[in-house]
Image (tube, rainbow, N blue to C red):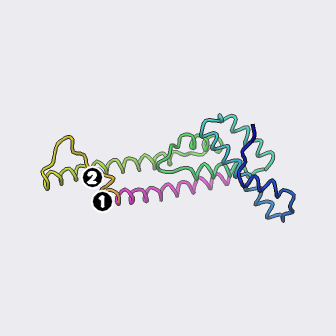
Amino acid sequence: MTEIKSTLELVMEKTKDLNFNPEEREEQKRKEVQLKVEALLQKYQENELKREQLEKALTNLEKYYGTMVKPMLGYKLIEQIDLDGNLSLILDLLNHFFSLETDQIGVIIHNFNRAIQSFSEERVRDLKELLDKKYHISGSAVFPNLEKDETWIATVKEIREKFNQQLGEEKRKLKERVRIS
């Protein structure tokens, strides 16, 4: 079975005999590592690799490319952290490879979800009251469509921005720790 190669990999093969200055060689090396780390992470997240296989592949990359592999892995993992994602695999790898405490990430995401849930419940109550008072529509079958409510949309955006700032600060701290280790 033939291997499918990315455009960058094909270009790199065609240009491997060209002479580069040291900065260009280093940049090329960094790009190669980045592609390989991203591919390994994707395979891991799609359950095509077990953690032990990922660890072995990363060790082999480190032997070939040197010390830039591990920090690049850490940065890629940290970049994938967001308020809506499934973070269990990411946090597990950060803890395993870098012994990073990621509890604060969980707290931020928990608080974000709680704030959204609380505001949504409050807004549903307010809208049901409004429908009852203004249009005399009430009952258990009445459920406002929050995704069409401009107040809900604007407030959720504000809540998201606030928690994204907190998450961004925590991600910055994690990147600092990855750089040090």
Q: Is residue 101 magenta?
A: no
Circle 1: residue type: Thr
Which badge, 2 or 1, is on the more N-terminal residue? 2
Circle 2: residue type: Arg
158 is higher (above) or lower (below) than 59:
below
Badge 2: few (under 14), some or many (20 or more) residues near its Cα, within 10 Å? some
Quadrant of residue 31 in the image? bottom right
Q: How many marks?
A: 2
Give the x, y percent position of residue 176: 62, 56
Give the x, y percent position of residue 166: 47, 56
Query: Which secondary structure type mostly characterizes the magenta part of the structure?
Result: helix
Q: Mark 2 and mark 1 in contact? Answer it, CB < 8 Å.
A: yes
Q: Quadrant of the N terminus?
A: top right
Give the x, y percent position of residue 47: 61, 35
Q: Give the magenta-colored segment's residue range.
A: 154-181
Quadrant of residue 98 in the image? top right
Q: Pick whichever, 170 or 150, lies toward us.
A: 150
172 is higher (above) or lower (below) than 59:
below
Residue at the disc numbered 2: 123
Dot 2: what SS?
Answer: helix
Residue at the disc numbered 1: 151
Quadrant of residue 14 in the image? bottom right
Left or right side of 24 for 143: left
Q: Pick whichever, 70 or 27, lies toward us.
A: 27
Dot 1: what SS?
Answer: helix
Give the farthest residue toward the front.
1
Give the x, y percent position of residue 100: 60, 46
Badge 1: few (under 14), some or many (20 or more) residues near its Cα, within 10 Å? few
Q: Residue at x 30, y 59 (%)?
A: 151
The numbered dot on residue 177 is: none
